[in-house]
Image (cartoon, rainbow, N blue to C red):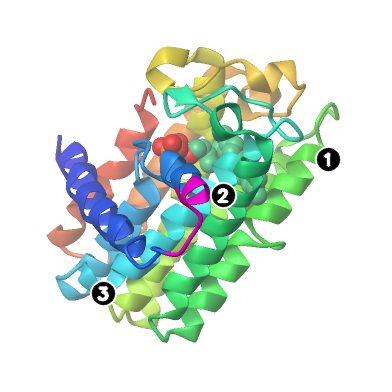
Amino acid sequence: MVVDTFLQEKSQRVVSALEACFSGYTHAPDGLVDAMKYSLFSGGKRLRPALVLGACELMCADDAPGLPAACALEMVHTYSLIHDDLPCMDNDDMRRGRPTLHRQFGEAAAVLAGDALLTMAFYELARTGRADAVVELAEASGVVGMVGGQYCDMQAEGVVGDLDSLQQIHARKTGALITVALRLGALFGGASTEQLEALTRYGRHLGMLFQITDDILDVAGDARTLGKSVGKDQRSAKTTYPSVMGLERARAMAGVAAADAADELALFGEEANVFRVLPQYILERDR
Ligand code: GRG
């Protein structure tokens, strides 16, 4: 309940801010803007921008300074999903409960909408004048972060991997964006080094937890509730937490990651309570 309210509130804040980002694009090609908006406003959980805003608010009792970074992160995340769904990658038909962008608008429009969202993300972040934030997002989303993790994940398809290589791939592919969400929120909220480091450690555990639950949902989740197809990992012979250790041990490992995440918050007072219960919420999620 606490987390639901938190996610709803932060989602509304970021959706309004995202809409405002498009208001200056009167000279942009309509079709491309429609494609970008189709994916951006298709009702994802908005977890990453909520983490930015929550971390910012935890630091300075106001989430407003974190809004540009929250928008930038949701744009990067959305572009990554659009490109991940393409025929040359996961070749998926459904995302967030409706046809994937390339199914609806064609492949070229999907590639370009993803490119434009990525560019727009850095435009919005650069406008804050915070070069340190731009560097953070570039590292987390680029070759040493999410894109690099996606590449390694695709290279590893059909190869039986161990837990160590799995964790390295997902620290980049999934963990980097979740961790940088907390770091950006902390930076814009004026965090001390100690606070930044604690939230970084929290983010790493949360990222791992998120990926394990994602793998579990691909085996045991419901496609309609998830809004995307299930069973893909097995079909594409991917190494996942359930494939390496079985479903029950994967669930236990997710439980440990959730507890480890909450333990990193000792530094903070009761204003961090939503972050304390968030890991359990992710552990129990069905979408
Ligand atoms: C194509 C550059 C590029 C990167 C792709 C995001 C990604 C990297 C791949 C998606 C595959 C996947 C299932 C990753 C696991 C974690 C993840 C990012 C899940 C989707 O995020 P959610 O559940 O999505 O937060 P919503 O729709 O709620 O925003």
Report the residue marked by disc 3: 65
Q: Is residue 214 left or right of residue 273?
A: right
The residue at 40%/81% (across/down) is 193
The residue at 36%/42% (across/down) is 41
Amino acid carrying label 1: it is Gln
Which tag, 1 or 3, sits closer to the chain's start?
3
**Looking at the picture, does residue 269 appear above or below residue 95?**
below
Q: Under tag 2, what secondary structure? A: helix
Q: Which one is closest to the eye, mark 1 or mark 2?
A: 2
Query: What is the x, y in percent for residue 195?
Result: 34, 73
Query: Who is closer to the viewer here, 114 or 272?
Result: 114
Which residues fall within the magenta stretch? 27-33
As drawn, the label of residue 262 is none
Query: What is the x, y in percent for residue 32?
Result: 52, 49
Query: Who is closer to the viewer here, 204 or 179?
Result: 179
Report the residue marked by disc 2: 113
Res. 35 visible in picture: yes
- Whole-number angstrom distance, CA of label 1 to CA of label 3: 39 Å
Which quarter of the rendered image does ligand 1 occupy? top right
**Looking at the picture, does residue 119 appear above or below residue 279?**
below
